[in-house]
């Protein structure tokens, strides 16, 4: 069994609470997934993530492929063991990172030639290679290789990108099915990994619909909505998500990639999105931006220089229980690394608490639904 997905509660507005059973963790959804780019959520240790209640984190295929290398990680027993994280993990395909290397890449039907941002060395990613890297890393969930459509993109460009994504999705799935027995062996779990497809198509509703319908026909374990938060207006993001959710199977996890701010993730969860990830909580934290029950706070502002109150009086995280606004401001002014770490811990606690609260409210507001589940999904066939 790769995964099972059991819808427990559903609201009239489409929001839902579910259990996503993965080899390393039963994940309660809706869930926010902290981003661990290079095998670490920046500035936050794994034991702290566990104490915050993080159930699943991300690893970045592109960065781990370049350093320390996926074969090295395979030899050391896979990514879970390498980074000492016994909970669930998801690896992206590397498509977004290659997309971000606009001046260092060349895209063709076969794959993507790109130069490393580290040393300028030349590399070639195909859908098959992206699968091989993720199989070596061994996370619970892998993602199909896709091309992220930039914003703005005209219709012709979006159509070309969609065709690449569809071709690469099928190649990813075929290669994954043929080689998934090469996933690193876990004594407790055996060889277990699932594969999600990614819906692209830019801001064009008909292209998005076509992509979703064709991916569903391929029968992935779950479905992600990609190509958002790349500069498009927020109302466009909302429209794309709202139009796509009804097209994705109710008995599979639905994942929106790379979103968003606290009010956004709450809104999307209430619409029926099961999984979300974003670098915002930790990236903002490193620049001194805190998310609080009173709104956004720039802790570097002078007004906090002698403010001994906690960053967020309504928060019970380890940072707010112990440290003052004045101290956090001092750390940022002094450019002490601890400042970014403490800010990140608070922001992650804030995000994770939103998901727990929304989950509880979805349960309280649920309507009667027939529990739906997916087990022994098609990629294991």
Image (spheres, rainbow, N blue to C red):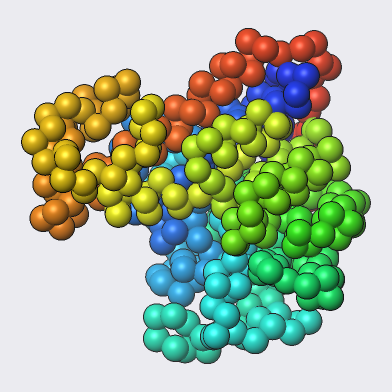
Which image quadrant for residue 252?
top right
Q: Nearer the viewer, residue 316 or 29?
A: 316
- Quadrant in the picture for the N terminus: top right
Going 46% across and 68% down the picture, which residue do you hit? 63
Q: Nearer the viewer, residue 208 or 73?
A: 208
Residue 32: percent from the left, percent from the top? 52, 38
Left or right: residue 236 compared with residue 257: right
Residue 96: percent from the left, percent from the top? 59, 66
Going 32% across and 46% down the picture, which residue do you hit? 289
Residue 29: percent from the left, percent from the top? 61, 30
Going 64% across and 14% down the picture, which residue do you hit? 363
Going 8% across and 36% down the picture, which residue do you hit? 306
**Above or below, comparing residue 49 to residue 287 in the picture:** above
**Above or below, comparing residue 361 to residue 349 in the picture:** above
**Residue occupying the far front of the picture:** 303
Q: Nearer the viewer, residue 251 or 353?
A: 353
Left or right: residue 129 compared with residue 249: left
């Amino acid at each position: 069994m790769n995964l099972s997905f059991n819808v427990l509660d559903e609201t009239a507005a489409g929001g839902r609470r579910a259990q996503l059973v993965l080899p390393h963790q039963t994940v309660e959804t809706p869930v926010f997934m902290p981003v661990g780019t290079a095998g670490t959520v920046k500035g936050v240790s794994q034991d702290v993530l566990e104490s915050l209640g993080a159930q699943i984190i991300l690893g970045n295929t592109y960065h781990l492929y370049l350093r320390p290398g996926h074969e090295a990680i395979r030899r050391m027993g896979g990514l879970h063991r390498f980074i000492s994280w016994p909970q669930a993990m998801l690896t992206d395909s590397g498509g977004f990172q290659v997309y971000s290397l606009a001046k260092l890449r060349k895209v063709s039907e076969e794959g993507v030639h790109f130069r490393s941002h580290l040393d300028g060395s030349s590399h070639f990613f195909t859908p098959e290679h992206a699968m091989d890297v993720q199989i070596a890393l061994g996370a619970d969930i892998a993602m199909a290789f896709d091309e992220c459509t930039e914003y703005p993109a005209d219709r012709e460009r979006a159509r070309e990108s969609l065709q690449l994504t569809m071709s690469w999705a099928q190649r990813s799935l075929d290669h994954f099915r043929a080689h998934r027995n090469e996933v690193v062996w876990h004594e407790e779990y055996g060889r277990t990994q699932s594969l999600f497809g990614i819906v692209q198509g830019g801001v064009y509703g008909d292209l998005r619909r076509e992509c979703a319908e064709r991916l569903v026909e391929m029968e992935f374990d779950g479905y992600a909505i990609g190509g958002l938060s790349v500069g498009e207006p927020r109302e466009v993001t909302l429209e794309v998500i709202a139009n796509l959710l009804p097209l994705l199977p109710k008995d599979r996890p639905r994942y929106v990639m790379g979103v968003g701010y606290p009010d956004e993730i709450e809104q999307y969860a209430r619409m029926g999105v099961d999984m979300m990830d974003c670098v915002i909580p930790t990236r903002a934290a490193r620049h001194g931006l805190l998310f609080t029950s009173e709104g956004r706070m720039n802790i570097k502002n002078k007004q906090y220089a002698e403010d001994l109150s906690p960053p967020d009086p309504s928060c019970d995280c380890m940072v707010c229980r112990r440290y003052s606004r004045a101290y956090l401001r001092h750390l940022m002014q002094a450019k002490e690394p601890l400042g970014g770490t403490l800010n990140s811990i608070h922001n992650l606690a804030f995000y994770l608490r939103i998901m727990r609260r929304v989950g509880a409210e979805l349960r309280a507001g649920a309507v009667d639904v027939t529990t739906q589940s997916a087990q022994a999904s098609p990629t294991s066939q």
